[in-house]
Image (tube, rainbow, N blue to C red):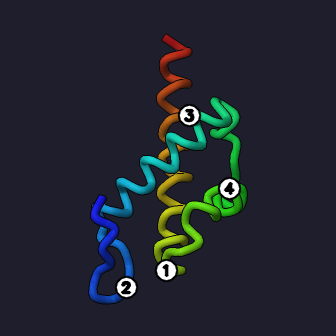
């Protein structure tokens, strides 16, 4: 991850996705399947220490990306459990 902001001061799309992957893995590592029950507000609060230095737009995007990744993870685990 380059961490170099775009001309408008935000992270590149690739950096946002990489950052979201790392944050999601961190939450899942710490909380396990309970991470699937987090609201977006919970995620905002939990990732704040890792993203406080970023532009407001990046923080907002990351909270949505992390929430979406956790929802996808929940769906995948549900499908595996049903098999």
- Neighbour tally class for label 1: few under 14, some 14-19, many 20 plus, Cα within 10 Å: some
> In this orientation, which residue lies closer to the viewer: 46 or 63?
46
- Earlier in the chain: of badge 1 and badge 4, it is 4
For residue 42, side relative to residue 8 (left or right): right
- Earlier in the chain: of badge 3 and badge 1, it is 1
Distance from the alpha carbon under mark 4 to that under mark 3: 18 Å
Task: Name the element at disc 1.
Answer: loop
- Give the numbered dot on residue 6: none
x%, y% of residue 7? 27, 88
For residue 76, side relative to residue 28 (left or right): left
x%, y% of residue 34? 70, 34
- Neighbour tally class for label 4: few under 14, some 14-19, many 20 plus, Cα within 10 Å: some
Distance from the alpha carbon under mark 1 to that under mark 2: 7 Å
Instruction: List the residue tagged with mark 1.
Output: 55
For residue 73, side relative to residue 44 (left or right): left
Q: Are marks 1 and 2 in contact (CB under 8 Å)?
A: yes
- Up-down: is 38 above or below 7? above
Name which residue lies at 38% across and 63% down: 16
Task: Name the element at disc 2.
Answer: loop
Instruction: List the residue tagged with mark 2.
Output: 9
Instruction: List the residue tagged with mark 4.
Output: 46
Distance from the alpha carbon under mark 3 to that under mark 1: 29 Å
- Neighbour tally class for label 3: few under 14, some 14-19, many 20 plus, Cα within 10 Å: some
* Position of the N terminus by quadrant: bottom left
x%, y% of residue 58? 47, 73
- Up-down: is 21 above or below 78? below
Name which residue lies at 54% across and 74% down: 53
Name which residue lies at 51% across and 50% down: 23
Instruction: List the residue tagged with mark 3.
Output: 74
């Amino acid at each position: 991850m380059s961490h170099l902001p775009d001309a408008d001061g935000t992270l590149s799309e690739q950096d946002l996705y990489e950052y979201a992957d790392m944050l999601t893995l961190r939450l899942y590592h710490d909380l396990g399947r309970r991470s699937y029950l987090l609201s977006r507000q919970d995620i905002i609060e939990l990732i704040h220490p890792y993203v406080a230095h970023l532009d407001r737009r990046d923080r907002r995007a990351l909270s949505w990306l992390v929430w979406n990744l956790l929802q996808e993870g929940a769906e995948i685990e549900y499908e595996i459990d049903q098999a």
